[in-house]
Amino acid sequence: MFKFNFSSENQDETDTIPDDLKSSGKTSIQETDGQEIEISNDHFQNMKQYRDSGSSTSLVRDFHLVDLKRVEELIASQKSGECESLKTAIQMNSDVISGVYEGGLKIWECTLDLLDYLNKESVQFDGLDVLDLGCGAGLLGMHALRKGAQSVHFQDYNAEVLSLCTIPNVILNNNPDVKSKTKFFAGDWDSLHHKLKNYDIILTSETIYNPENYGKLITIFEEMVKENGVIYVAAKHFYFGVGGNVYEFEKLLRQNERWNTSICFCSTEGVKREILKIVQSADQNH
């Protein structure tokens, strides 16, 4: 039975904690907040079982993704104290609970916008180091891997999202040697500066909905992008109810003359959506 490294009511309780957590002395995946989540042998074995069982996958832009309905059922079956953040979000039918769950189980519209843009413009990834920031299902990072990136690091707020969703998706869509090219980081952006490295390309989608996090996000850009690196931010023009918007984010960026921004995509129907391309100004590179 495919387990996603978690137990169901019919499984032995000794299987409830993944091996990487057992060795660290932690008792739940959420306790790895702010740390690296490693791909374990159990992840590969579970995905083999998933394929062999004929379990369904959804197909999104030619990527096979684990069935989120099945993931939600497995989350709901966990005993008290496990996956509480995701359980709460599922029970509340909420896309985002600030500081608890940041939407990683949903594929957001702007992610597809950015994925389509990267394909249409044939953005080059060959031999580059890439960060998928706020990765969720991992579509943007998986695209970079498919296009020859040297390394791809995936980050999401919730460690459970990485273990239950992102890592399985990466394994489903890539060769076994993907372990040597990828790393996965969980936690608030403030907790990750000592873990992340410098990147040629940073990809991030739907991460500017909360203005309170703008400073953290821009600090990641300042500290983690290489001198000639490029940042792509895909976002709705305005986030009703929480106040985030592209104009205010750009305005904050431009307070520091380090950055040049341009809009490289704008939707023509429905809720207005944009993609910002951010590079360091020429003055900063000399």
Image: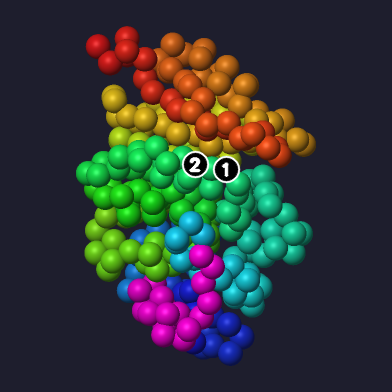
Whole-percent x, y for residue 40 in the image: 35, 69
Figure check: 209 above or below 173: above
Figure check: 279 above or below 5: above
Tell whether 141 sits left or right of 83: left
Q: Which residue is mark 2?
A: 114
Mark carried by residue 110: 1
Whether the residues at callouts 1 and 2 have beta carbons within 8 Å, the answer is yes
- The answer to whether residue 156 of the structure is visible from this angle is no
- Residue, x 46% and y 53% (percent of image)? 139
Q: Nearer the viewer, residue 92 or 117?
A: 117
Residue 70 shown in magenta: no
**Image quadrant in which you'd find residue 280:** top left
Dot 1 lies on which element? helix
Q: Nearer the viewer, residue 196 or 28?
A: 196
Q: In the image, what residue type sits under mark 2?
A: Leu
Residue 45 shown in magenta: yes
Figure check: 9 above or below 159: below
- Residue, x 24% and y 48% (percent of image)? 150
Q: Which residues are magenta?
A: 43-59
Q: In the image, what residue type sits under mark 1?
A: Cys
- Residue, x 72% and y 54% (percent of image)? 94
